[in-house]
Amino acid sequence: MRKFATTTGKILSLLCTAAFFAATPALAKTVKVDIHAIEHEVEIDNKGTKFAAWTFGGTMPGPVVRVTEGDTVDFTLINDQGNGNSHSMDFHAAIVDVLSEFEAVKPGSSKHYAFVAKYPGVFMYHCGADNMAQHIAKGMFGIIIVDPKEGFTKNYPKPDREYVLVQSQYFPQSGNAMDIVENIGSTNSLINGKIFHYDPLHGVGSAKTLESKPGELVRIFFVNANVNEPVAFHPIGNIWARVYPNGNPKNVIHGMQTYNVAVSEADTFDIYSPADRTTHHAYVDHTMKAAHHGAITIMTNSPDADPKMGKGDNILPR
Ligand SMILES: [Cu+2]
């Protein structure tokens, strides 16, 4: 009996050791992130309309920053010499001092700081230089994804594809900062920097849609980078299987038709493409004014889906 107990104990101990190693979180690392503030023209539709933007990294939104919970983000903002304005970087994933780390720096100088990504999820980043409304409307925003250190779990399964969608308001006359603060002059909604970016039905010149294959799990990382308006995020012809408020796997809501995303909020949306047929769905801001003016994204679900879309570095199609 005693021998049995000892053997059982050893087996349990081995199992515990195995379980411990299986659940060992990814080792925290330091991730160096350098981003240039660049003031230059970008195209805000698929027919060549130009906008005098202020950007992170030259694009609107800026580059996708992706780290794992517990990582240290070693960040440098370089405000290029040729720019006309001071800029700053406010990562919503950081716990720091707003006057210190988030201070604005003049053209020709840079700002370095580091922070630990303590919470998993999806977070907006944006310029906080005065006037903040204008700097955001000009295009200075993006997403930082903080993957959970536990990796994928039953409640946060591995997706087949991932897409980043960042919605923002378009103010073509963006010179008067207080007009933007008061929400005056916004004519359109941009998805990843363009009007009807992935909607060939409504967007003149729009060629591509998001793509999936039947039966796939698609994970959408969504950011509301509007200056003043919430987003009623809804998938026409489908239902959000799971919504993770702030993208944290511990926050799960099931079977949602529409989820209200506050200004500056980011959330993660899981959705299954029907397995038995080819379909089209439209991910929209159900706020009609926004949908009619650009906030519609078509998802094509077909066996012919591009195997590279929504994978690796191709989660924010430009
Ligand atoms: Cu700025």
Image: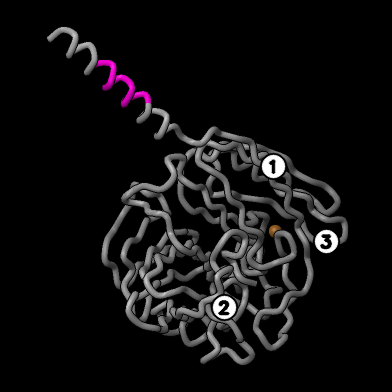
30 is within the stretch colored magenta: no
**Residue 184, labelled with which disc?**
2
Mark before the other along the chain sequence, 2 or 1: 1
Q: Which one is nearer the viewer's eye here, 129 or 148? A: 148
The amino acid at mark 2 is: Ile
- Real-space Cα distance between discs 2 and 1? 38 Å
Mark before the other along the chain sequence, 1 or 3: 1
Name the quadrant where ligand 1 sits: bottom right
Q: Which one is nearer the viewer's eye here, 260 or 88? A: 260
Residue 225: in sight, yes or no?
no
Residue 112: name its quadrant: top right
- Real-space Cα distance between discs 1 and 3? 24 Å
| Span shown in magenta | 9-17
- Real-space Cα distance between discs 2 and 3? 26 Å
Majority SS type along the magenta span: helix
Circle 2 crowding by C-alpha within 10 Å: few under 14, some 14–19, many from 20: some
Q: Which one is nearer the viewer's eye here, 107 or 233? A: 233
Residue 185 image position (x, y, % from top left): 59, 81
The amino acid at mark 1 is: Lys
Residue 6: name its quadrant: top left
Task: Look at the numbered disc 2 and give the secondary structure of its residue.
Answer: loop
Mark before the other along the chain sequence, 2 or 3: 3
**In front of the other: label 1 or label 3?**
1
* Mark 3 sits near ligand 1, with its Cβ under 8 Å away: no
**In front of the other: label 2 or label 3?**
3
Residue with the mark numbered 1? 32
Task: Look at the numbered disc 1 and give the secondary structure of its residue.
Answer: strand
Residue with the mark numbered 3? 83
Task: Look at the numbered disc 3 and give the secondary structure of its residue.
Answer: loop
The amino acid at mark 3 is: Asn
At horizontal 72% and vertical 54% (from top left) the residue drawn is 87
